[in-house]
Image (tube, rainbow, N blue to C red):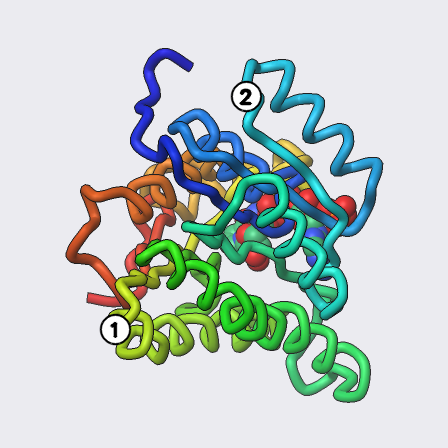
Amino acid sequence: MSSFSNKFHGKVAVVTASTEGIGFAIAKRLAEDGASVMISSRKQENVDTALAKLKSENLTKVAGVVCHVGKEDHRNKMIQETLRRFGGIDILVSNAACSPMFGPVLEVSISRTITTIFDINVKATFLLIKEIVPHIEKRGGGNIVMISSLSGYTLEKMIGAYGVSKTALLGLTKALVPECSEKNIRVNCIAPGLIQTRFSEMTWKNPSIRKNVEALIPMSRIGQPSECAGVVSFLCSDDASFISGETIIMSGGIAPRL
Ligand code: NAP
């Protein structure tokens, strides 16, 4: 912990889907950098376990609440609980997403799968940002970071609908810039390639599949959640004070754009 800064001292961060994986690493890093952090996910027991882990690392300015991002009353409760515990909101990291199907895009069931993917990955992100912006504005400005994916840029045949939802976040990042800039809010995005979490375990748990996957990555390895957390910490910091509307691809060297 001593190697981290206190750059977010006095700042309050809300990180969605933050009881494990990338969201947990981001919450931990922002807390290590001095922020008060509200973590959340759908299950109380996961919130309790994650909170205990953070506290066991001497990160005491953390709180947790159950929040399924697709549910308006949950989002509302998360916001109110953050205001009650920490007195305001300066940073929102919108991290929650789902990828409920693996298969060709034309076989996706419109009524269920498409609706779920777009409700959670896009609509809930948009609504949560809309709900939290007035609170960040009250603090005189702050930061929003969305978690997209490399698959928002690349062609991934078996997760095409998920990829389209992640492309939408690239557009949302850009679309929010004019209004957010007027409120002194920077809005940015990260697009991770393969990161070692439960979400992606089918690509790394089996050693021979992992070897094949890593052979396709210029840096010859998959990424770690803490590496996403470092980039989010940078984007929310004054070191990134002139960056807004940007998406940082972090993919071990896979370069899907100029
Ligand atoms: P993960 O390790 O599977 O963690 C998922 C977290 O989200 C858990 O804390 C889970 O807790 C929570 N969660 C799931 N659905 C939720 C919902 N509807 N509302 C609130 N919380 C929810 O996943 P991850 O790999 O860290 O993924 C995080 C983000 O990174 C996602 O946006 C994903 O698309 C993106 N991403 C991941 C990779 C990768 O390779 N891992 C690559 C690119 C982008 P509960 O079960 O308690 O809800």
- Write down the residue under mark 1: 182
Amino acid tagged 1: Glu
Answer with left or right where residue 133 lies relative to residue 159.
left
Percent across and percent down for residue 138 are 40, 60
Inspect this view and state whether residue 209 appears.
no
Residue visible at 74% across and 60% down in the picture: 74
Relative to residue 158, is residue 52 depicted above or below? Answer: above
- Write down the residue under mark 2: 59
Amino acid tagged 2: Leu
Front-most of residues 211 and 62: 62
Quarter of the image with the C terminus is bottom left
Percent across and percent down for residue 56 are 64, 14
Does label 1 or label 2 sit earlier along the sequence?
Answer: 2
Front-most of residues 141 and 257: 141
Marks 1, 2: nearer the viewer: 1
Q: CA distance from mark 1 to mark 2?
A: 34 Å
